[in-house]
Amino acid sequence: MKKLINDPDDLLPDSLAGFANAHADIVRLHSNPYFVYKKNKPTSPKVALISGGGSGHEPLHSGFVGAGMLDAACPGHIFTSPTPDQMITAAATVENDAGILFIVKNYAGDIMNFEIASEIITAPIETIIVADDIALPKEHSMGRRGVAGTLIIEKMVGAAAEREHNLAYCKSLGDRISDNTASMGAALTSCTVPALGKPTFDISETEIEMGVGIHGERGRSTQKFTDATTLTHYLAEAIYDELKPKKGQEALLHINGLGATPLIEQYLIYEIAQKFWSKQGVTITRSLVGNYTTSLDMAGCSMTLTLLDSELTTLWDHPVHTANLRWGC
Amino acid sequence: MKKLINDPDDLLPDSLAGFANAHADIVRLHSNPYFVYKKNKPTSPKVALISGGGSGHEPLHSGFVGAGMLDAACPGHIFTSPTPDQMITAAATVENDAGILFIVKNYAGDIMNFEIASEIITAPIETIIVADDIALPKEHSMGRRGVAGTLIIEKMVGAAAEREHNLAYCKSLGDRISDNTASMGAALTSCTVPALGKPTFDISETEIEMGVGIHGERGRSTQKFTDATTLTHYLAEAIYDELKPKKGQEALLHINGLGATPLIEQYLIYEIAQKFWSKQGVTITRSLVGNYTTSLDMAGCSMTLTLLDSELTTLWDHPVHTANLRWGC
């Protein structure tokens, strides 16, 4: 394993310090316990959005802390849940007289630790569970995993909070976006967790993992490697079956690189996907292409579709000023 | 080789179509010959900035077309120079009564084809040659390669053009930024060009290529693989010896991912680098971390330092609105 690291134990703290220094105009780093939070606290009451989860998915979540999106992000060790003290201290730091909203990807450890935190925090609190990965059936015992749809919820709910919608509204908005969002990924290679030093799973030079999770979890099926069009249609058809969009529906299409896949390939996937959706009568009115929810150095991509209405479109377009998503300001 | 592609010959056109569709609010794609250009032509005269080069380095250059940066980008096939007809047609499209400025990375084919174009174009024209890669000695027969410093020149000169500085001023500004910019990269793996289907160069699990070029060109030396601090100091010391910054100097530090290296590692390199420069009395006042000048799926990173003065800082901060660099608007 070759990685740009020193001692694997120092990777997260040193990388967080670098992140906070590189973006000192936007964020601050709290060190004991670790969380990244918005440099400028809003001057009027606003629902405080806190997310977090295992590291290794950067820029998710720390790269989305800032005006119009998250108030704080709590990073666990690589592929490991953050601990309740992180969320509790973060909440105390960013709470701003309008309650706390947790945005939590559906993994057992994350759910448990955010729940413990929410029981201890005395401010009004709600939680949005993100479970957009349709690779697993809805009735799976652990539920579905949260993947690249997370940032769409963080963005839109972040905009709603900035527009001074209250906690109950932000919570129900998040659930509504969840209901209208579906994702699925495909891996060409495994990722390698630095502390382990070997690939998370085995995949041969002739295979592709359809429906892979962002920690290298097995997906729907290990298939024979195929061309970009076949792969893209596989992902898109699964999403189509899930969301069943009507003709004339507007949507946001997000092609997400998992880490090691070049942009030139991601835009090819986007092009194929856009044509697919157009054929189904779905108009892609908003797009996002790039490495946003990664799985360390995994090669592959995921597709996320969010069905839009005028409110969600307005919230997507609302100014955002974070390290890795920035427009309108 | 596993890549998200169909026929390798279709990768570039289909990917460009996807790029233009995903960013239809910013750019347009011209198809025969290929170039990406700014959707909105400025209403008053402005020096038109045109860059280009082989594809496979995305987001460079197409991702930097838009307000405050490039007027057009001419993509060649992967790792292949664009042809003169691309630059000639692009120039005719974006020329806006204040002349044309070519920004060209120093590779023989690029230099030759931009030069042919400049001989045919009748509008006033100047060329900035980017040769920021200090891996090779200054007196190398081909000169030094242009790498990640290119985007810094594109950004700052783009801002100057937007502020209606004239062609001569923009040209001399670009040369001045070049003189104050140095880069060096390190590769952990090779990249794989889709049409070739095998790695561009051999590198073992225990080696690192110091001073690698963005097409996988050999660098200063193939070394035993080492830790992040040793690697970062190697790059930084080479840049220090080149630019010889005085104590109290302000600088822009750009850590660039070459493709397959996760952000968590890039921010670690940034942190180590920032400490290095601080120790030399250089204050990092501007930062950029991420995959900006890539080499397909190569793992590794590069460091670029630009010595700043108040004008260059102001030009860096000037609003920019492109697919992959956006702030202030």
Image: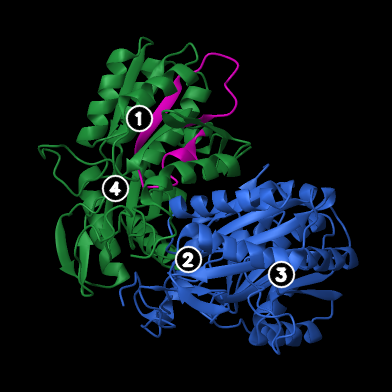
Chain colours: A green, B blue
Check whether the beta carbons of the residues at disc 2 and disc 1 lie within 8 A of each other: no
Disc 4 designates what residue?
A183
Circle 2 SS class? strand
The amino acid beneath tag 1 is Ile
Q: Which residues are magenta?
A: A36-65
The residue under the point 23% across, 34% down is A109
Q: Position of residue A217 (x, y in %)?
A: 20, 52
Name the image quarter holding the N terminus of chain B. Answer: bottom left
- Near-viewer residue (A90 or A189): A90
User: Nearer the viewer's eye, disc 2 or disc 1?
Assistant: 2
Chain name for mark 3: B
Chain name for mark 1: A
Separation of residues labelled 2 and 4 (CA atoms)? 29 Å
The amino acid beneath tag 2 is Gly
Q: Are marks 4 and 3 on the same chain?
A: no
Separation of residues labelled 3 and 2 (CA atoms)? 28 Å
Judge the density around disc 4: few (<14), some (14-19), many (≥20) Cα neighbours within 10 Å: many
Disc 3 designates what residue?
B50
A271 versus A282 height, above or below:
below
